[in-house]
Image (cartoon, rainbow, N blue to C red):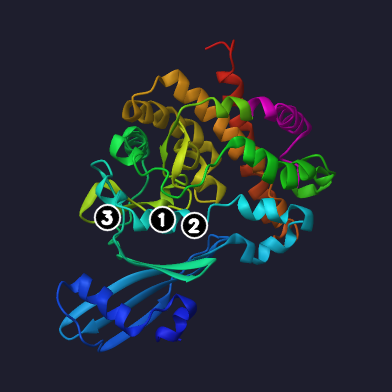
Amino acid sequence: MTGRDALGAADVPDRTLLTMVADQVGGPVDRIDSLVVEPVAYDVPSITTVGRWWVHGRAGTASFSFFVKQVQAWSRSPVFARVPEEHREAAAASYPWRIEREVYRSDLRDRLPSGLRMPRAYGVHDVDDESYALWLEVVPTVEQSWSLDRFARAAYLLGRLSSSPDVAEVADVGGFEMSAETYRATRVTMQLEPILRSDIWEHPALSAFDPTLRGRLLAALDRLPELAAEVGSLPRLAAHGDACPGNLLVTTDDPEGFTLIDFGQFTPLPVGFDLTQLLVGETMIGQLPASALGPIEDVVVPAYTAGSGHDQDVVRRAHAVLLFVFTGLSTVPFDLLETTPPPELAAVAAERAAVTRFSLDLLDATSPGAST
């Protein structure tokens, strides 16, 4: 399907489309001469994204292009069916699927610090009470390797984002408060803890999670109320919320800067929060080996500190706690046990175990009284 029917509920009325095209081409448009819709190839699963499409066309002598994304409440995701009935209300309320809509309706684009930008929104359209469609600028990206310098540059700019007074004024535009305590009470209590305390470790493909690592992981899990309280005491700053390299696009016109996308978790968050996904995001999807984490961590913490203006010891400890709570605790690939061939699963588990070990080592190294 290459016509507008391919967009399904993300499509818009003819008049709305003409208005958006006119806005993009910078002049009046009274008809669309051609239009093609192409699904966007995207292999990272999402519980709230219905679909992504490129929309290309011509109106007279002008050409136009949009990136279209439909977002829905995660209670509509097939994955939600796995949530026990007694936990569904709390689980449905725990995921901020509306934030991106409010971000693109705001003027955040005009407030970002130099070096960061975001796509222009030509339209933000409600599909129904639990879904909306974004019609966005197509960003001209260029493939660039992520050197240590690029990681450091990204960390510095994320630090500047966190400390920007202009960004702070709209940081809570989504009206959703995210906290470690809520995360502990929902995902950890309802899903992760029962799995981690089960006999899942008997699966042969999980041998990389050896008894010593499992013991350290479960001991840290016992300390989660204390760690969540520590997170709650940290300064809360504006944060992208999912600042993995895949969401920091490099463009042809600004190869030293980044275009931020996927604002689904943009909100005030503890200082250093964006360092977690910047550091481990590519490793968690198999794009970067866990052996790279140490060198990257060595450059991103001081770079973020320089951008944010916060004390480096505070940033490093915050980063350590956040990394463990939001990633180190959840690396076991239990969701792949029934679908991934044993050799591939064992390789994934080995990388994930390395992430957990790294996060535990950093947690220990930054604990009060730890030797430096």
Does residue 288 appear to the left or right of 308 in the view shown?
A: right
Secondary structure of the residue carrying tag 2 is loop
Residue on which disc 3 sits: 251
Label annotation for residue 102: 1
Q: Can residue 27 be found in the magenta stretch?
A: no
Quadrant housing residue 2: bottom left
Q: Amino acid at mark 3?
A: Thr
Secondary structure of the residue carrying tag 1 is helix
What secondary structure is the magenta-colored segment mainly?
helix
Does residue 357 appear to the left or right of 372 in the view shown?
A: right
Q: Position of residue 72 (x, y in %)?
A: 54, 65
Q: Residue at x 74, y 60 (%)?
A: 82
Quadrant housing residue 356: top right
Sort mark 3 into few (<14), some (14-19) or many (20+) by Cα contacts within 10 Å.
Answer: some
Q: Residue at x 68, y 30 (%)?
A: 224
Q: Residue at x 44, y 34 (%)?
A: 296
Does residue 362 appear to the left or right of 132 in the view shown?
A: right
Q: CA distance from mark 2 to mark 1?
A: 7 Å
User: Which region is colored magenta?
Assistant: 206-227
Secondary structure of the residue carrying tag 3 is strand
- Between 294 and 33, which is closer to the camera in this rendering? 33
Q: Amino acid at mark 2?
A: Arg
CB within 8 Å, label 2 to label 1: yes
Can residue 354 be seen here? The reply is no
Mark 1 / mark 3, whichever is N-terminal: 1
Task: Please identify, in this view, whether the residue under mark 1 or under mark 3 is nearer the observer.
Answer: 1
Q: Can residue 216 be found in the magenta stretch?
A: yes
Q: Residue at x 66, y 67 (%)?
A: 78
Label annotation for residue 98: 2
